Amino acid sequence: MPNLLRYAAEGIKNNHLSYDKVVERSNALEHQLKYQVWVAGCPGCAAACFVPFFKNSDHGAFSGEFRHDNTGNFNANIMVGYEEMAEMNHLLNELGMDGEELGGLVAWAMDMYENGIITKDDLGGIDLVWGDIKATIELVKNVAYRKTKVGNALADGYKRAFQVFGDKSIPLAWQFHGCSGGTYDARNRDLGRGLEYATSHNGARMGAGLGPALTEAATICQFAEPPFNTIWGSEAEFTRAFLNAVCGWNLTVDDVKTIQLRNYYFNRAVSFREGYHPAKDDGLPERCFTEPIKDKYGKQWVWTKEEYETAVKKYRTDTLKLTADGLLPRDGLVKVGLDFVIPLLEPMKAIG
Ligand code: SF4
């Protein structure tokens, strides 16, 4: 997380800001030395799971486990650091809430509060200023228990909340297909996930894309992929090695590539059936084109419309094996034995 923040690949202040010194308050080493019980995770993992921490402070005793999924869209995105997150991390787990989604919603609410779109009354009296962890905790509880106008609306997610907060709230929402996307920035082409998020039929999450859809389904953690790639050379090869070892199969790399395609195409076919269509749903938040960001080292990221249109077409055909418009290719479906979806999806203009 800290490095993603320094390289402008993770949201800062609801994805408005370039590098800001608040980033240094998400200090993994300091957290490790001060609070963690042990530090071992998978080799190379920047946010290892199953590592508990304990913290005593004037506010009480806290325990929890930092993961990118339960912390990543908070931190600098709501203008706090690890010290504050250590005192609310347990609450997210206790309430069983998706921190990645909720962090973006809280950052959006802070933004709307600052811009006068929501008021203290709408928040049940909470003064929701940037960086206030107590206010954040109260809002999180209100979302969980659907209390107050804002808590109740946020509990339904972005798309329904737009109807409550109105048109002015829409440009402030950092969302893709109705899903919070601040855990990775969408402008940064090196470490961000703009094209993955823009084209994903299942939201701005790990598992968006062709290969990742299979590795996530097979519970192969993406944070461990860099060392796996170093050892096995490619995603398809380490997926083959793991599936064979666990299932006793004898798959080849070509088998794995076919399974990747079948899994991805079928998943996308179900999304089409349920109403998704790239022509109306794909794209980046407008701020990706109008709000440049800089990383700690001065590199600037922003999209132009032309760059995006060219890149997204290439990404769909070369990486996702779709048509340039994001449709399922007829030949590809036939090749992997999914031709039975063609008559069902043709009336939805999903086949290209
Ligand atoms: S690589 Fe994944 S499974 Fe391994 S410690 Fe990191 S988050 Fe956990």
Image (cartoon, helix red, strand yellow):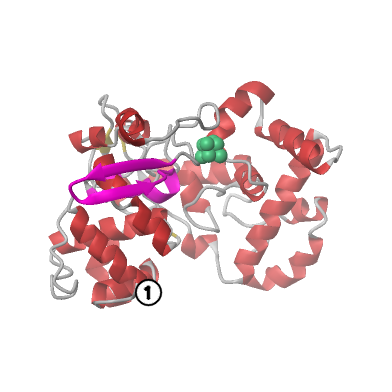
Point out residue 195 in the picture as x, y percentages from the top left corner: 48, 45
Horizontal side of residue 313 vs 75, given as left or right: right
The part of the chain drawn in magenta is 52-78
User: Which corner quadrant holds the C terminus?
Assistant: bottom right
Tag 1: Cα neighbours inside 10 Å, few (<14), some, or many (≥20)? few
In magenta segment, residue 224: no
Is residue 230 depicted above or below 132 in this figure?
above
The kind of secondary structure element at disc 1 is helix
Point out residue 261 in the picture as x, y percentages from the top left corner: 72, 48
Residue ID for mark 1:
160
Point out residue 117 in the picture as x, y percentages from the top left corner: 17, 68
Point out residue 301 in the picture as x, y percentages from the top left corner: 32, 36
Camera-nearest residue between 178 and 246: 246
Residue 315 appears in which quarter of the rendering?
top right
Q: Could one spot residue 174 in this view of the protein?
A: no
Q: Could one spot residue 236 in this view of the protein?
A: yes
Task: Inspect the image, locate mark 1, and give the three-letter code of the amino acid beneath it.
Answer: Arg
Determine the residue positioned at 31% across, 45% down: 86
Determine the residue positioned at 36% across, 37% down: 9
Horizontal side of residue 220 vs 169, given as left or right: right
Determine the residue positioned at 77% across, 40% down: 246
Determine the residue positioned at 27% across, 24% down: 297
